[in-house]
Image (cartoon, rainbow, N blue to C red):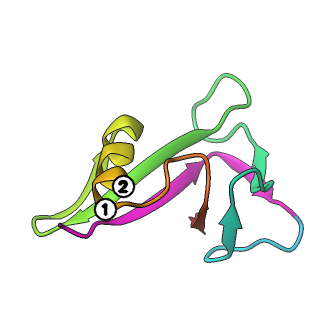
Amino acid sequence: GKQYNVKVHYAHLNGFAPGLKEGSQVNGGDLIGYHGNTGGSHGAHLDLLYYVDTPEGRVLVSPAHVEKLLQQQGAVALGSGSGTTTA
């Protein structure tokens, strides 16, 4: 099957968890960072965005679509396993 490169972007972070930096490996349940209140927001929150590299370029996709792509690859479902942080 097709292989997809998925990047996860956490927007509005107030900061990473101690000892964590961009590119660190993380596992399901790990503390990644702290929600913040940046930009034009009206309160503390976190935006979780998924980008997938395709032959046409990098595209923003919904979490449900990313989970389907990962399952097609035989990868773990979202919320478990491991990944890489991006800021």
Asked if marks 2 and 1 touch (Cβ < 8 Å), the reply is yes
Q: Is residue 67 above or below residue 9?
A: above
For label 2, the SS is helix
10 up-or-down from 64: above or below: below
Count of picture labels: 2
Please tell me the numbered disc located at residue 49.
none
Quarter of the image for residue 15 reads bottom right
The x and y percentages for residue 41 are 61, 29
- Please name whichever residue, 14 or 28, is drawn nearer the observer in this view of the structure: 28
- Residue occupying the point 76% across, 50% down: 29
Q: Which residue is mark 1?
A: 73
Q: Residues within 10 Å of mark 1 (few under 14, many from 20)?
A: few
- The image quadrant that residue 86 belongs to is bottom right
Q: Name the dominant secondary structure of the magenta segment.
A: strand
Q: Which residue is mark 2?
A: 70
Residue type indicated by callout 2: Leu
**From this viewpoint, which residue is outermost toward the right?**
18
* Pointer 2 local density, CA inside 10 Å: few below 14, some 14–19, many at least 20: some
Is 84 drawn above or below residue 52 in the view shown?
below
Q: Amino acid at mark 1?
A: Gln
SS at badge 1: helix
Q: Percent position (x, y) of residue 9?
A: 51, 55
- Residue numbers of the magenta segment: 1-17
Question: Which residue is at the front of the view, 54 or 64?
Answer: 64
Q: Residue at x 17, y 66 (%)?
A: 1
Spatial CA distance of label 2 from label 1 is 5 Å
Q: Seen from this angle, which residue lies furthest top?
A: 42
